[in-house]
Image (cartoon, rainbow, N blue to C red):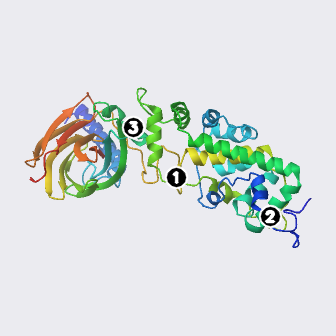
Amino acid sequence: MNGRSARGFLVSLALASVACVAATPLLSHPAFAADDKVPSKVQLTVLVVSATDSESGVDPRLAALASSFRYFKYSGYRLLSQQASELAVNGSGTFAVDGGRKLKVTLLSMDDARAKLHVEMSNDQGKVLDTTVNINRDGTFIISGPKYKDGILMLPLRVSY
Amino acid sequence: MRPYPPAADPHEPPLTEAEVASLSLVDPGADAFRAAFADLQVDVVDGVLDALNLPDVGLASVFAGLAEDASVDLADAVLAGLDDADAMLLSAFGDGELQGDQRARLTRHALRDRVAQASLRETARTAAQVREATAAPVDLDLWNAVAIGISAELEPELDVGDALRTALRALPPVDLSASIMAKVSPLNRRTTRWVSYGAPFMALAAAAIVLLAIVPGLVGKNSVLVASLTDVAVPFQIASVNDAQVEDLETSTDVTAQVVQFEDGGPTFILVDDSAPSGGTL
């Protein structure tokens, strides 16, 4: 190895060492797995929203979703409940949904950009919906349509990490 | 300093109902003052009071501060506008000190004191006006004023008034006035001094009644106005990008489903129609 090659090698080695040292605080963050840079848990938030014609206006707590509701015919949107659960990979959370329903969500996998969820919705007679959704980090999707009183329910699910 | 209320004369005949009725005494809700809750944080809007056309005597100094600060302890703010005399009177009334024998003695005193009579009647009239104003359907301008004051983040094309009305109806009933009473030092009946019902007291009492009436369920224990409730720890947020890919989807035989994204970046909807007679499951 000549002088230039040796110098280049040493520079590369130094840069690599610096990079490892710089990454150590990030890797040791509690939210990260000890041997992986990818977060190991997600915060799953589930809203239960009543869409109805017997009321009018959008619940101020649903302000972030108001623009999405405009595509529906209902005059009123009220937040019935907000539930949250922290899920690790292969972990599940079950959420109560008005009208005698339940929503079970299982985190199948996750990386630094996306998470995959298995979602099952059941009523008192059994499972009525079974779906797998791949969603971007901090993204939201909405299950909409189960009948509730004179309108329907909307179930926004947000996966954040 | 005159003793309040004047000492009872044991030989004096009891008051007749006609005598009491002649004073047109109206109890603006003594029971309402007894319910207690603490740590009230309320954003109050001048527009509410303007829309109800309430007398503004004594209110300016109280609500000027509230307009600048979105989170204010209402009880403290109201008391800041009261002088000691009114505070004691308010406390006496709210603590039930004007009931039973106390109330009878006050009434008897008022029958003899024309100034006191006039003040009490004015209070009664104000209370009646407040009740009348708040019993009537509230028009949209009022609700819009309140919504603007609380800076609710709503789409421009949405009906702000209806949105706020819907939110307020969702809140449990609450006695706002109790928060005010909880801040007033308890009075010793023997040392309480009698003072006239002054305009500032009437205005502030009316304001408390108005706030109680127009925002029923405004706050519960340790809760804040409208925009957040005790059961919502963190406001729900929507990211600018919501890219959901539905990899598989099954429904029961009587349920249909459809996947729709109405706008770029917006949330994906899994539209489920379970309106068919139930019976099937996966």
Residue neighbourhood size for the residue with mark 1, other residues' Cα within 10 Å, grouped as few (<14), some (14–19), many (≥20): some
Q: Which residue is mark 3?
A: A58
Mark 3 falls within which chain? A
Mark 2 falls within which chain? B
User: In the image, which disc is placed on residue A14?
Assistant: none
Q: How far is the residue under mark 3 from the one under mark 1?
A: 20 Å
Callout 3: SS: strand
Q: Which residue is mark 2?
A: B15
Q: Pointers 3 and 1 in contact (CB under 8 A)?
A: no
Mark toward the viewer: 3 or 1:
3
- Say if labels 3 and 1 share a chain: no
Instruction: In the displayed orientation, state which residue is furthest to the bottom.
Output: B10
Q: Amino acid at mark 2?
A: Leu
Q: How far is the residue under mark 3 from the one under mark 2?
A: 54 Å
Residue A6: image quadrant is top left
Q: How far is the residue under mark 2 from the one under mark 1?
A: 44 Å
Q: Residue B219 at what x, y percent from top left?
A: 53, 51
Callout 1: SS: loop
**Residue at 70% across, 63% down:** B95
Q: How many marks?
A: 3
Mark toward the viewer: 2 or 1:
2
Q: Left or right of B190: which side holds A161? A: left
Tell me: residue A119, above or below residue B4. Answer: above
Q: Which residue is mark 1?
A: B223
Q: Pointers 3 and 2 in contact (CB under 8 A)?
A: no
